[in-house]
Amino acid sequence: MDRQILLKNISVPGISSFGPYKSSGGYDSVIKALKEMTPEEIISEIKKSGIRGRGGAGFPMGLKWSFIDKKSTSPKYLVCNADESEPGTFKDRYLMEHLPHLLLEGMIIASYALGAETSYIYVRGEYKYIIGILNRAITEAYSNGFLGKNILGTNYSLDIHVHPGAGAYICGEETALLESLEGKRGNPRIKPPFPALKGLYGSPTVVNNVETLACVGPIIIMGGEAYSTIGLGRSSGTKLISACGNINRPGVYEIELGLSVEDFIYSEKYCGGISNNKKLKAVIPGGSSVPVLPSDLILKTADGKPRLITYESLAEGGFETGTMLGSGGFIVYDEDACMVRNTWNLTRFYHHESCGQCSPCREGTGWMERVLHRIETGEGRWHDLDLLVSIASKIEGNTICPLGDAAAWPVASAIRHFRKEFEFHIANPEIVKDKNHGAIEKYINVRSAV
Amino acid sequence: MSGFKVNHKQYEKEDRKVEFSSGTIQKVRQIISRYPEGRSASALIPVLHIAQEELGGYLSVDVMDYVAGLLGLLPVEVYEVATFYSQFYLEKTGTYVIEVCRTGPCSICGGEKISEFIGEKLNIAVGETTEDGLFTLKEVECLGACGYAPVMQINTEFYECLTTETAGGIIDMLRKKGEKKEGSRWTDKFF
Amino acid sequence: MIAVTIDNIQVEVEEGTTILQAARKIGGKIVPPAMCYYSKLKGTGGKCRSCLVKIARTSNTDPRPAAKLVASCSTPVQDGMVVQNITSPEVIETRKAIVEFLLINHPLDCPVCDQAGECDLQDFTYEHGLDTTRYEEDRREFNQIDIGEKIKLHMTRCILCYRCVYTADQITDKRVHAVLFRGDASEIGTYIKNVVDNDFSGNVIDVCPVGALTDRTFRFKSRVWFLNTVNAHRDCDKCSGKVTAWMFGNEIYRITGRKDQFGEVEEFICNECRFEKKDKSDWIIEGPRKIERKSVISQNHYEIKAKQSVIKPLEGKVEPLT
């Protein structure tokens, strides 16, 4: 359960530069793909691998590629989504900082498979130095004949450009990203049409996450079949998990899908346990948008099976007792964390980042934030909890893009699993008025019956 | 019920002459060439970054009008974009813009204390600029460095795993450096 | 032609037609409300979510229901699609929520608002909303500005439908206003001290579903339901000159475009016709114009509605169509 695919060469000195990268087997997949394979064969290998999008939605990558309108006479585009902004997620930054060529390798093959001759990497504006790293890597790839006209002497030509964002979480949504790339406000588009038919500049477009594209090279080298045997069942391959919060060893880890959550949190190889010898209270396992789970439900499913890091196991139990793998951003809370404060904090994030285009999200996120802030500062009312659940349920599913869902799930799940803690806040305004009140697990048993 | 008042933002045009250097114009041409013919609007966000770096640290009306002219856009098409993205500043900022992350993972690791500490040290509230024009303090949403929390970004640099001591040290160091920003502009270095 | 069933009524429409357009072809009570969609303006729709409907059957080839409610204004029909609007309790419930969301930052100042009586939000609330609110927090309030010489912007009332932005984009030659900023801090504005000044700028008043953009030449002059409406025309070199004149006795109080049964203008008119020609002798009066009396405009003729008037899904035909 610890095969390394993406990060296997991470400790090679100078791996972010072309020379060392090439001599450790880098770009072999491009040679194989462009010289020996047709675009259809590449798409078929990707399909066989069973790889699912690593950005959060988990959509099968091969399927996404096969939707692209090949018959269209307009140019096709591949856009790499490097607008990593999901709180708790910082794996793409790590990948681009240390292995920029792995991303380029995947993008060249993907562009070739999709028939794209221009591709863009949309990098969030905060990652300014990453833009420098990527541009350096792109220049190296041009001067070594892996980008530009007639790559490796074939008929295939490709240009890759880096495009900076400017601070908007919503641009991680693929159609908002395309709008932003066209120089507009990052308002998600109304779908249909989907980008595979009408994307960038109205042309067929595929948008893939950095980590997803980084997997393409290794899949081409080992073959889709072999890749699909890594991992567990329908969760094939490895996944970068960014771990943060109250743990001893925060950072980015490559795990084989199927590793147990308990191993991941407590093993010295990964998170190394909860910091300061405290107890585990809760985990958000897929970036801040997915439901939070209390310690017992994150370590074991409701029927007592060990919870594994796979798309299926984390989702087991639905939203009642389960959650989602999302982008693989593990946020770990220790026993001192105040769940009300944290829920308010995340809701403030979604309120701040809502684009404001559709009414449930524009108005609902702010409403939830204001109510949560009242509860957190000792001005909560008893009906507020049902109100919050109701607002969340009315935002969920009724918005243009998934930001509405992402804002609703943390609130609904926090109240579902930590209702007593919210009630404690409402019942004890004097205690929670102190900003540093921390968790109230010390006062009562927090977990409500599920 | 009392409401909270919002004033319509209405800025004055100063008719100040703003212009990129010829080297920057070259750079802008090169950026435009990354996008297909007739799609120069795509260059808007990168060019606004450059304008903010080169023309005074924030996007005044005149700067935006100038950019609109360069890219063949209506001025309002620039305003609507500039006001959408958090990293474009519409008011004058200090030489060093301190952006402390306030989102979940940083907050449970002490991010709020860092911002409070810096505010007290510089004697400014969040959103304000010091009188000497050196520092602006901002709280921002997730900077994507959650594993190294708490974090802040000052101009292009990330400062990670902060404590009040290290944060104080960084401020002192920058104050010593004063107006002289290190190295070249990030837009020159990275674009 | 393809067949689609909306609230048990089948209609044949051309491929590419949206659910809302198909419903409008049927007409009557089963037409979903639209606050941001405007058929005359390209790109509008999808934003306010008041037209959400349930797809009970996607098409003949894919008989599954859709996972979520969809915006009827921007979802094309497919052959064999079955749609539920007022026959779906889920849709009715969601619409209540949309009303609530649209109202939390709305001042509810109908008693002093010029739009009262012809306000889409008022009608929408009356038809679909609850008569109480659960919102107890502060409301956002903007100062009022004159966005044009004859146009008042009362941003507090705005529901950010973007219609006025599309109007300026598509029927004037140079747009100077936009939606600025983000999220619930978004505002309609010009950013710099500038006024919207264009021969066709007055049309933003007609497309505004609420009282955010109002005619300064008509402000506080009269309640719309006290006025008689007549079709009138004149020779105009800028526009068709076909308007609706709102009259009190022999006096013209205001001029607007002619609105169809869905509240959309038939033709956009110029500012000269709208703002300057207030004398009866400027116009050739064609005759009275029937105004769609939806709810509150029907002064003294309020229908007392039974609340929760949901029709049980798929139980026989819906009530007769008007």
Image: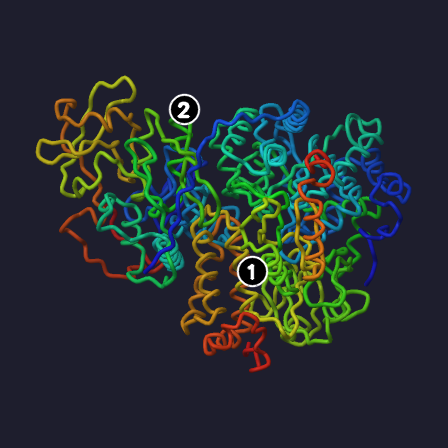
A151 left or right of A443 in image = right
A389 to A144, vertically: above or below: below
Residue C187 is tagged as none
> Quarter of the image holding residue C150?
top left
Kind of element beneath mark 1: helix
Mark 1 vs mark 2, CA separation in Å:
43 Å
Residue under label 2: C173
A49 to A272, vertically: above or below: above
* Residue kind at label 2, given as amino acid type: Asp
A187 left or right of A70 in image = left
Subunit that carries the residue with mark 1: A
Categorize mark 1 by other alpha carbons within 10 Å: few (<14), some (14-19), many (20+): many
Residue under label 1: A346
Work out whether residue C211 or residue B49 is closer to the camera in this orientation and state it: B49
Quadrant showing the N terminus of chain A: bottom right
Q: x and y percent of residue A17 in the render?
A: 84, 41
